């Protein structure tokens, strides 16, 4: 499977373009390692994970987020602290950390917003963040550079950097650095899965959840042709912008790097994805990733709900949030009223 894609990459743009235009079943049968990134889409030099600044040394540590993004104090347990930290020098390299000061170290849930890779904001994830804080977990609700700020892989790098910063300062946040999950919505689901498949697994990462995740930008490019819906055409343009304005035929290595099913490896964490049956990010994208992961022994569950709901509206459908929470609890363990962690 990996050999087929590496061969296609070695043959150049025509081969990858042919791969992109292949039917879903053919695309699902391929995977590869992370190729060298195309120079035209390089992120800012300061964004590499190894050089990530720490929350404790951040110049922009602030009190709780702005009123529009922060929870009501009446709804927040007294032992919970909420602060905003910078994990990099860019204005969007910031994260809200919700942590419990009492009890033993807690597992963490990282929440990644969507918005076509070009928009969105962590403030829209406040209620989701609160729900996981109320379950007893540390929560990290993060922003990242958008495609208008920097091309791929800057967005994946930002998530890696934020995770590394929290793990490095786990004692500050009363957090277990070896127990965390990523939960991403739409474009954020793509980033969560891309981090999960980065290398041969990430230290401490116990699971990845995607709600309507476009894990196959190549498929989005194909589906967004003139025959696609308006939303699919918009997603195609968004994927091109993420790639630095470059199409798959011109920048095959960039697109291969964005294509999560190409990067499945045995050390990757288990994954869960939700889609609506008729939404513009079709379930078959996650089915492709599932096939790639299961070929190397990693389990993935893909659930499809009836209708057209996408991202956060899909998460609010009856039973979806509860299923996600139960799956996360199975990965991280439940936090007892005393603060102890079971499982």
Image (cartoon, grey):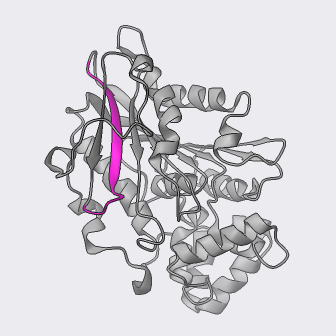
What percent of the width, then of the height, locates residue 325? 57, 28
Residue at x 21%, y 50% (from the top left corner): 60
Residue 343 visible in the picture: no
Along the line of sight, which residue is nearer the eye, 98 or 28?
Answer: 98
Query: Does residue 64 show up magenta in the picture?
Result: no
Q: Which residues make up the magenta segment? A: 89-101
> In which quarter of the view is residue 19 placed?
bottom right
On screen, residue 55 above or below 255: above
Residue 86 is situated, as x and y percent measured from the top left of the image, at: 26, 51
Above or below, 35 against 186 in this view is: below
Specify the quadrant that holds the N terminus.
bottom right
Decide if residue 279 is on the left or right side of residue 129: right
Residue sitting farthest toward the left: 57
Residue 95 inside the magenta-drawn segment: yes
253 is higher (above) or lower (below) than 91: below
Q: Residue 188 at what x, y percent from top left?
A: 53, 53
Residue sitting at 35 percent across and 41 percent down?
96
Marks counted in the figure total: 0
Q: Position of residue 211 (x, y in %)?
A: 63, 46
* Image-based side of 35 in relation to 107, left or right: right
Relative to residue 116, is residue 161 drawn left or right?
left
Q: In this view, does 171 lie above or below 39?
A: above
Residue at 74%, 28% (x, y): give it. Answer: 318
Viewer-closest of 36 and 278: 278
Front residue of 59/46: it is: 59
Residue shown at 64%/65% (left/top)? 216
């Amino acid at each position: 499977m990996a050999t087929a894609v590496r061969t296609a990459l070695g043959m150049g743009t025509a081969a990858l373009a042919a791969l992109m235009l292949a039917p879903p079943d053919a695309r699902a049968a391929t995977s590869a390692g992370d190729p060298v990134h195309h120079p035209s889409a390089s992120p800012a030099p300061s964004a590499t994970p190894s050089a990530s600044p720490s929350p404790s040394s951040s110049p922009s540590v602030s009190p709780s987020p702005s009123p529009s993004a922060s929870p009501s104090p009446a709804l927040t347990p007294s032992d919970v602290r909420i602060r905003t930290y910078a994990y990099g020098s860019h204005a969007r390299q910031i994260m809200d950390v919700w942590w419990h000061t009492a009890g033993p170290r807690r597992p963490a849930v990282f929440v990644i917003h969507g918005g076509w890779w070009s928009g969105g904001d962590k403030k829209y994830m406040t209620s989701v963040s609160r729900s996981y804080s109320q379950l007893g977990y540390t929560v990290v609700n993060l922003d990242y550079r958008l495609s208008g700020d920097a091309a791929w892989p800057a967005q994946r790098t930002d998530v890696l950097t934020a995770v590394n910063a929290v793990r490095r300062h786990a004692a500050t946040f009363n957090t277990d650095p070896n127990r965390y999950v990523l939960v991403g919505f739409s474009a954020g689901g793509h980033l969560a899965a891309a981090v999960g498949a980065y290398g041969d697994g990430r230290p401490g990462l116990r699971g990845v959840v995607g709600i309507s995740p476009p894990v196959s930008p190549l498929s989005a490019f194909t589906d967004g042709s003139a025959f696609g819906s308006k939303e699919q055409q918009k997603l195609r343009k968004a994927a091109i912008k993420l790639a630095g304005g470059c199409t798959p035929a011109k920048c095959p290595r960039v697109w291969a790097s964005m294509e999560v099913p190409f990067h499945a490896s045995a050390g990757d964490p288990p994954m869960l994805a939700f889609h609506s049956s008729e939404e513009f990010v079709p379930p078959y994208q996650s089915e492709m990733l599932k096939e790639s992961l299961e070929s190397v022994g990693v389990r993935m569950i893909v659930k499809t709900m009836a209708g057209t709901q996408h991202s956060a509206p899909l998460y609010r459908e009856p039973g979806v949030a509860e299923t996600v929470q139960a799956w996360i609890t199975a990965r991280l363990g439940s936090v007892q009223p005393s603060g102890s962690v079971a499982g």
